[in-house]
Image (cartoon, rainbow, N blue to C red):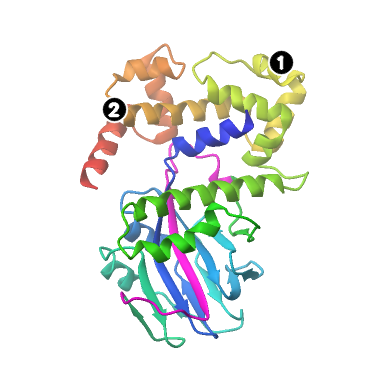
C-alpha cells in the first residue's frame, strides 16, 4: 500500500527525466551550476519545477550546496538537487569554480542531446565534439514535475540527495553508459535515457525512505508509518469516498485523537486538509487529461456540488477549474 501511494504521487505530478550533458574534466576541476530559478525555464519551458542530478561515471569529487557540508563522491554515485539549488561540483571543495553561463545553456538549447563538453582547463572548454576519455566524467541531467495543485513529495526531500554507488546493475549505474551511446545515433537512445533518469530518481527515493531516521517527519515519514501510511493509501485509492476522521482512524487501527495527533505530527497538516488537497490534485489530472464536464470531475473527486468543488479548487489553485483547464491546454499546445 505504501509503495502504491508513492507511485500514485509520481504519476500524478508527471515526473519526466532527461540527460543533457556529458562532461569531461581534468584532474583539477570545479564548476558551479546556477539554481534552477535561472535555468529551469531554459531547459523545460512548460515545467512547473525542475530538479538537477549528476552521475559521476568516472573519477572522484565533491558536491556542495550553500549552507551544507560538502559530500564526497566516487565513481557511480548520483547526487540530486530536489529543490533546484545552485551547487558546486569539484575535485576539491576549496577550489574556485567556473560558473556555467545561462546564456550558453540558452544558446545550445536546441542542440542534439546529450551534449559532449570537455574542460581543457579550469575555465576553458569545448562542446559538441566527440569527447576523449578524461580523468573525471560526469553525466548531467534534469527531472521535471508539477508542483501544483499539490505535490506532497517535494517538501519531504532534502536540498541535496546523495545516492552512493551500489553493487550490481541498477538504473543509475546504466545512465553513464547509455549517455555515451546516445550520441552515436542508436535508435531509442533518448527514450532510454529518459526512462533511466526517472527510474534512478525512484530508486533514490526508495533508498532514502529506507534510511529515514526513526524520528523523521514529513510526507515520506508518514508513508513509512504503518498506521498513517495505511490512511494515506486509502485516501489515494478512493479520494471520492466521503471519508471522515473516524473512518480513517478506524482503518488505521487508532483512536481518533491518537490518529489525528500522529498524522499532524508527521505530515504537518490535519487528515481532512490532506484529503481536500489530494482531491484537488486528482481533479487537476482529470481536467488536464479529459474533456469531461467540470460537474463530472467534481463527482469523481467527491463533490456532489459543482459550485462547492469550484470554490475549493479556486481556494487551492487560485483560479476556477474551467480557466485552469484552458491554461493547461494552451501551455501544452505551445510546447
Q: Nearer the viewer, residue 265 or 278?
A: 278
Q: Quadrant of the N terminus?
A: top right
Q: Position of residue 64 (x, y in %)?
A: 59, 70
Question: 10 Å neighbourhood of mark 1: few (<14), some, or many (≥20)?
Answer: some
User: In screen coordinates, is 216 left or right of 104?
Assistant: right
Q: Is residue 136 magenta?
A: yes
Q: Which residue is mark 1?
A: 250
The residues colored magenta run 128-155
Tell me where residue 162 sits by quadrant.
bottom right
Q: Kindly identify the residue that appears in the image at 58 percent across and 15 percent down.
A: 243
Q: Nearer the viewer, residue 88 or 267?
A: 88
Mark toward the viewer: 1 or 2: 1
Q: Kindly identify the residue that appears in the image at 60 percent across and 26 percent down.
A: 233
Q: Which residue is mark 2?
A: 322
Q: Position of residue 58 (x, y in %)?
A: 55, 72
Q: Is residue 157 above or below residue 254?
A: below
Q: Secondary structure at mark 1?
A: helix
Amino acid at each position: 500500500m505504501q509503495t502504491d501511494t508513492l507511485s500514485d504521487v509520481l504519476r500524478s505530478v508527471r515526473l519526466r527525466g532527461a540527460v543533457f550533458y556529458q562532461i569531461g574534466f581534468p584532474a583539477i576541476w570545479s564548476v558551479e551550476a546556477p539554481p534552477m530559478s535561472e535555468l529551469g525555464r531554459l531547459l523545460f519551458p512548460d515545467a512547473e519545477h525542475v530538479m538537477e542530478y549528476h552521475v559521476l561515471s568516472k573519477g572522484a569529487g565533491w558536491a556542495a550546496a550553500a549552507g551544507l557540508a560538502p559530500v564526497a563522491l566516487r565513481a557511480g554515485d548520483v547526487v540530486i538537487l530536489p529543490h533546484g539549488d545552485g551547487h558546486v561540483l569539484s575535485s576539491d571543495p576549496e577550489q574556485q569554480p567556473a560558473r556555467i553561463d545561462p546564456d550558453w545553456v540558452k544558446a545550445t538549447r536546441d542542440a542534439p542531446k546529450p551534449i559532449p563538453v570537455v574542460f581543457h582547463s579550469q575555465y576553458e572548454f569545448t562542446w559538441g565534439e566527440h569527447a576523449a576519455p578524461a580523468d573525471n566524467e560526469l553525466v548531467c541531467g534534469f527531472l521535471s514535475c508539477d508542483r501544483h495543485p499539490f505535490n506532497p513529495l517535494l517538501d519531504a526531500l532534502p536540498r541535496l540527495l546523495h545516492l552512493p554507488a551500489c553493487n550490481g546493475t541498477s538504473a543509475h549505474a546504466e545512465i553513464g553508459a547509455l549517455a555515451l551511446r546516445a550520441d552515436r545515433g542508436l535508435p531509442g537512445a533518448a527514450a532510454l535515457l529518459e526512462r533511466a533518469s526517472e527510474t534512478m530518481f525512484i530508486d533514490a527515493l526508495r533508498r532514502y525512505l529506507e534510511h529515514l531516521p526513526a524520528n523523521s517527519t514529513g510526507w515520506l515519514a508518514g508513508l513509512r508509518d504503518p498506521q498513517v501510511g495505511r490512511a494515506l493509501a486509502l485516501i489515494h485509492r478512493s479520494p471520492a469516498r466521503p471519508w471522515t476522521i473516524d473512518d480513517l482512524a478506524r482503518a488505521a487501527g487508532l483512536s481518533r485523537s491518537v490518529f489525528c495527533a500522529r498524522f499532524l505530527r508527521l505530515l504537518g497538516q490535519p487528515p481532512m486538509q490532506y484529503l481536500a488537497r489530494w482531491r484537488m490534485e486528482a481533479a487537476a489530472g482529470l481536467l488536464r487529461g479529459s474533456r469531461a464536464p467540470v460537474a463530472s470531475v467534481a463527482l469523481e473527486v467527491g463533490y456532489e456540488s459543482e459550485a462547492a468543488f469550484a470554490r475549493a479548487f479556486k481556494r487551492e489553485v487560485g483560479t476556477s477549474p474551467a480557466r485552469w483547464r484552458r491554461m493547461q491546454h494552451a501551455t501544452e499546445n505551445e510546447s
